[in-house]
Amino acid sequence: MLAIFHKQFAHPPQELISPESSSNIPSGKPGSARRQPKNPDEILRDFYAAHPVDSFSATFSGGAALACVGPHSRQPSRHQRLFCSIDDIYCMFVGSIDNLSTLIRQYGLCSKSTNEAVLVIEAYRTLRDRGPYPADQVVNDLSGSFSFVVYDNRSGAVFAALSSDGAMPLYWGIGADGSVVICDERDVVKGGCGKSYAPFPPGCMFHSEGGLKSFEHPMNKMKAMPRVDSEGVMCGANFKVDTCSKINSMPRVGSAANWAGWGDSV
């Protein structure tokens, strides 16, 4: 799956942007040059080139695009891939949720027509419409190996998460125009974002207004560790939960504790 969002929709951590991303200075090796980030249309073309027969996409006004490989891809994957939309909310989901049946009953859904992507959209809508639970608790209730990206076309909100087991690949980076790129294929992100890319941290979620946050340890801050490539050049950062520090805050209660607390635009 591939998701690209204009910088007006998403505000990633500043550490994700490599200080070398705008440099055209050649590296120390003769004949080599810094790998430059690409524009969204170029990144989409690279994705299509990697999946020329079985990929499809949806683009939106304002600078958002979603692309994924169909469930019957000629390149078999051991992970389930789903794409769906409900009421102008779109979800790309890779993997599986082990407690899907339990959550279907919890959200009062029809089990015959509900898959993981539909469940994630319903959970998002519950949070967006001032549901009773904070976002980190809702995502932490999902048991399994998964990654997903949700895009709300009405509000422009972006929501992404990666399961805590680290079994699913997920990467993110910054394109040439500042767009946020999220993809489960390393070569696509690395080729499209130059030095400004990194693995998405397991057990974490990203929201366009609230930024990156751990859903396993919501009271702990995220720590960015500089990444250095084989040439000794700093390129983006790895993100992990800082277990030595906690965010000082009052316990969350009532409607202010939920999704709406991440930003009124949702």
Image: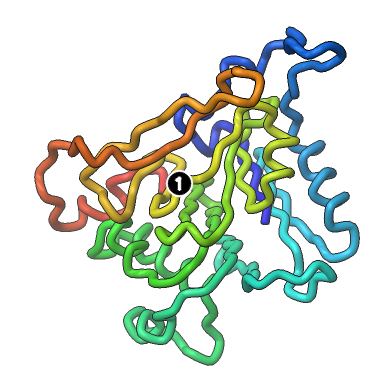
Residue at horizontal 66 percent and vertical 19 percent from the top: 231
Where residue 8 sits, quadrant-wise, is top right
Amino acid type of the residue tagged 1 in the rendering: Pro
Q: Determine whether, in the image, residue 160 is placed left or right of residue 47.
A: left
Residue at horizontal 68 percent and vertical 26 percent from the top: 177
Residue at horizontal 18 percent and vertical 38 percent from the top: 246
The coloring applied to the image is rainbow
Q: Determine whether, in the image, residue 71 is placed left or right of residue 99.
A: right
Residue at horizontal 46 percent and vertical 41 percent from the top: 208
The residue furthest top is 25
Could you tell me which secondary element the residue under label 1 belongs to?
A: loop
Where residue 69 sits, quadrant-wise, is bottom right
Q: Is residue 242 above or below residue 123?
A: above
Q: Looking at the image, which is closer to me, 155 or 224?
A: 224
Residue 17: horizontal and vertical position, in percent?
55, 24
| Disc 1 residue crowd, few under 14, some 14–19, many 20+, Cα 10 Å | many
Question: Is residue 128 something one can see in this rendering?
Answer: yes
Where residue 265 sits, quadrant-wise, is top left
Residue 237: horizontal and vertical position, in percent?
49, 30
Question: Is residue 263 something one can see in this rendering?
Answer: no
Residue 125: horizontal and vertical position, in percent?
42, 64
Which residue does the numbered mark 1 point to in the structure image? 201
The residue furthest bottom is 112
Q: Looking at the image, which is closer to me, 175 or 264?
A: 175
The residue furthest left is 250
Number of numbered markers: 1
Q: Is residue 249 above or below residue 232?
A: below
Quadrant of the image for the N terminus? bottom right
